[in-house]
Image (cartoon, rainbow, N blue to C red):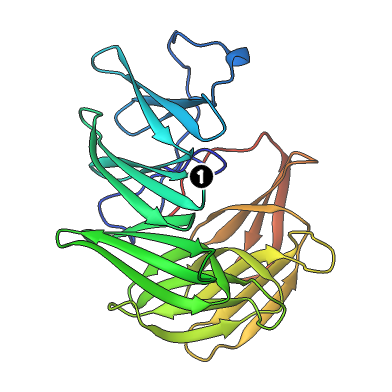
Amino acid sequence: MAYGNKALSYEEQDPLTGAQPIDRVNVPKLPITSDEGYSNVVKDANHNYWFSKQLSPTHFEVYVFIHRLAQLRTFQVNGSPNFYEYHNSICIACEGEEWNGWIYEFAKDDPRITHQWHVKGIFCDLKRKGNKLIVSSYCVEEDKAMLTVFDGNGKNVIELEKGYSPVNMMVEDNGIYIAALSISAAHQDTILLLDEEFHVQQSFLLDFSPRTIHSWNGSLIVHGLNGRTGKSDQLVYICSKTGRQEKYAIPSVELIECSNRDLTFYDADQKILSLWDHEKKEITSMRESERPHVSKLF
């Protein structure tokens, strides 16, 4: 699950399966009140409740209410937390001070910290591929996109493109896709495809700023910002084999889920939920709604 400034997310044991929705639930009586600065309460697949509170500009306290024990535990972390849920663990990725990131891994059955890692640079995204935990970051001093890979052999730091900052990753059968923003006007924003050894195999140049990437039927789907207007109204389907791009006009919305049939968009200002059909390449339904809390694919 990803939380903090991101949505709660869940990944099944197979990282390539479809995402399952995680809904808000009736929260048990916890020792918190909404006006005390706590984050919104979210629930993992084991019915444990996770939330956090900022103690200082760079330190947060993480709370987990363990459902089966009716017990509340607390942990302090360095930086603003983003929660990720996997089959057997919870990972908390923190955006720490002085351009440092911290990753904490918790056992999900008995929530305690099992691993703690440091990541050089500004934390961007986290994915799991098999037994590898992959963290993307931007190293300010070297002006480079970086990957840090943790597995049974330890830690491996991989330098990617200079002058780029990663914003989103996607794990596929043929490799790892990374959406990257150009730091200077000298380069275009791009999507990078990395192989199993994390070497860049292909790049797709973009004329807008990518925010999220998804896949459907052999195509990459990129949603992002229009650099001229600052609106999130850019949607492009890219053929992963030929690189051919098809751009479509959409309202300025948040893309919150991609399924095999459609995209789910949410307009926070109008509180409108809409579905975009992959085949028809158009919005097929709209309705008033609060923002749904759905899972995302890691």
Residue 140, above or below 7: below
Q: Based on the displayed image, in which of its 4 quarters is residue 208 positioned?
A: bottom right
- Residue shown at 47%/74% (left/top)? 217
- Residue shown at 48%/31% (left/top)? 59
User: What is the crowding at mark 1: few (fewer than 14 residues within 10 Å), some, or many (at least 20)?
Assistant: some
Mark 1 lies on residue: 97
Q: In this image, 87 relative to 158: left or right?
A: left
For the image, the number of numbered tags is: 1
Q: In this image, 117 relative to 217: left or right?
A: left
- Residue shown at 73%/72% (left/top)? 248
Indicate the position of residue 28 as horizontal and vertical percent values: 43, 12
Indicate the position of residue 226 as horizontal and vertical percent values: 77, 67
Q: Is residue 214 visible?
A: yes
Indicate the position of residue 61 as horizontal and vertical percent values: 43, 25
In which quadrant will I find the N terminus?
top left
Q: Is residue 298 visible?
A: no
Between 152 and 169, the residue placed more toward the observer is: 152
Q: Secondary structure at mark 1?
A: loop
Q: In this image, 75 relative to 212: left or right?
A: left
Residue 44, above or below 179: above
Between 2 and 181, the residue placed more toward the observer is: 181
In which quadrant will I find the C terminus?
bottom left
Q: Looking at the picture, which amino acid does disc 1 mark?
A: Glu
Indicate the position of residue 155 as horizontal and vertical percent values: 24, 61
Q: Which residue ends up furthest to the bottom in the rendered image? A: 242
- Residue shown at 60%/88% (left/top)? 244
Between 190 and 148, the residue placed more toward the observer is: 148
